[in-house]
Amino acid sequence: MSEIGNTGYRMSVEGTRGAEATVRLAGRLALESLEPLMAELQAVPGRLEPRKIAVDVSGVEYLDSAGALALIEMENLSRSRGIPFEILGVSERDHGLLCLIDREALQRPPLRPESESPAVVVKLGEAARRQYRDFLEVMSFVGELVAALAFCLAHPRSVRWEEVKFTMKRAGADGLPIVALISLLLGLIMAFMSSLQLKQFGANLYVANLVTIAMVRELGPIMTAIIVAGRSGSAFAAEIGTMVVNDEVNALVTMGFDPIRFLAVPKVLAAMLVVPILTIYADFFAILGGLIVGITGLDLTAFTYIQQTKASIRIFDFATSLVKAVVFAMLIAGIGCQRGFQVRGGAEGVGQSTTSAVVSAIFLIIVADSAFAIMLHYVRQ
Amino acid sequence: MESPNIDPVIIVEGLTARYGDVTILEDVSFEVRRGERFMILGGSGCGKSTLLKHMIGLLQPHRGRVVIDGVDITRADEETLNRVRSRIGVLFQADALFGSMSLAENVALPLAEYTALPPGLIRDIVRMKLGLVGLAGYDNHMPAELSGGMRKRAGLARAMALDPMFLFFDEPWAGLDPVTAAELDILIRSLNEGIGTTMVFVTQELASIFSLGQRVIMLHKDVKGIIARGTPQELRETSADPRVNRFFNRLAD
């Protein structure tokens, strides 16, 4: 007989008020009918106020642990009301099941109370401590990373260049299409929006200056860095975090490798090499976007637009933009690896560290960019 | 109660399993009877975990069929498949408890998903299940705080949450010390005998094979299929196949 699709139990109660009550159960006492079964059973003592309750289960075809639970809860209820209770007609197999259930365990409170959410002051204190610990960990990681990079500078052969090349391809070449697309659209939008204003003054030509200066000085490095943080910073954190969870990092340590030199240095080097190149591409595609708007919407020739672009940019701006890109790359790759090494626990920890890697990287990029803006302002003068 | 030991509830027929072009199992057929403890044995790489994954519908066979309780799960639609799945419990090798949930939440998850029971009743069932596996009181502990044996038992409690008709175990003894493994044997036996759940094990743990196995099949990678069937004692004492002898007597090739 298949037990799928055959549901339901039958229950009848014999006995008058105040006398002995006999409850006859038949059919399936199983999980799917647990709720009505328990409600119906537990109504019996209140309705009849019997001297004694006997439950006859000889007609039961199938009893699972949920059905057994209903019987045991009924027994507990009767006992608590001082009514004698017995179960009749239990088959050998069902008897085994009823014996398996630890009646005491149903009543026993958990060893540990459900964690309540702590008071605001406690939360605040914990958050502050977490921030402080996080700061210490980042600082010590920065120290170790700088030491490892310095070591690699002195011993270039100790760097795993194969890994560097691989990461360069993943973070750089594979990221080029999205960087190109976003920059092109950015250039188009900037040129289009500014042309609406500049047209009124007949200053169409200055669209080229606007796009070029904005892109090369500020937006190129920042947009590229944010895209790389989202694509690769998160990937670094997830990769190293999963290695921590799987004891792979411990394996490296026991084999005598420095995990930072082995895992973090190639990623940081690859990012430092590849993000400036991506930034150049971003600048190029944004200028191309501006050029498209210039030719199609502003009646400029390609030659004039390019001449104007050349005139508006100095080598100094271009060089500082690349320096910025290198610094951003260090921040992204460094924080990505650090968040990875920080992972504790399992899948949830990896998820948290990945999110944190991207958020922290973007935060650091903006802070660093602000610092550059002020510094460069004084250097240019 | 219907008599056990005759009616097959899981039928595997002509199963051929492939990963890409690599054939793992070729034309494997066997039956599992209601209420028995059935074991799939074999050395590493013989395809026993692959076979288990086909039996619980995680992988689609290249050829052949798997019938569970009258439903061919290789051809069933999603709805039927889910109904069958709610009758199946699986204890994975790496216990697969959700690390971000307490034990009670882990066990309550399938109950909340597949039934419409009120929270109070779910809590009672969870307590009962944790009590069944000897973890009464550990409701609010996190999986990471427990020992390997306790996690295995918690995984078993979750696998049993919906009172499945079938329990599948993938190497349940892996990584357990002998004492804990023996305790798990006793627990599994009492659950099998008390609740009558049909149990299928994938294992290579000799001690547990002899203490729990009622009928076994043995797979071998050379033939990509079954090389022996019977009770563990029969295979140890009467099998003429040297590969079976080496396995049961723990000898090197």
Image (cartoon, rainbow, N blue to C red):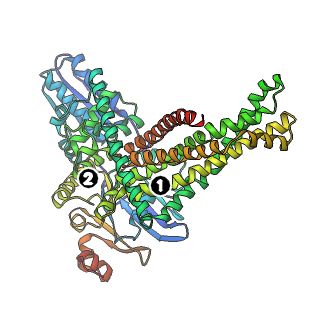
The residue drawn where x is 63% and y is 38% is A217
| The residue positioned farthest toward the front in the image shown | A381
The residue drawn where x is 73% and y is 42% is A287
Residue B135 visible in this rendered orientation of the protein: yes
State the mark number for residue B27.
none
State the mark number for residue A267.
1
Image coordinates for residue B226, horizontal then vertical, percent: 40, 73
Q: Amino acid at mark 1?
A: Lys
Rendered image quadrant of residue A261: bottom left
State the mark number for residue B192.
2
* Spatial separation of the CA atoms under disc 1 and disc 2: 53 Å
Which chain is indicated by disc 2? B
Q: Amino acid at mark 2?
A: Asn
Quarter of the rendering occupied by the C terminus of chain A = top right
Q: Are marks 1 and 2 in contact (CB under 8 Å)?
A: no
Placement of B93 over or under A356, stated as above or below:
below
Label 1 sits on a secondary structure element that is: helix
Image coordinates for residue A238, horizontal then vertical, percent: 44, 49
Residue A117 visible in this rendered orientation of the protein: no
The one of A375 and A224 positioned closer to us in this rendering = A375
Apparent side of residue A65 relative to residue A164 in the rendered image (left or right): left
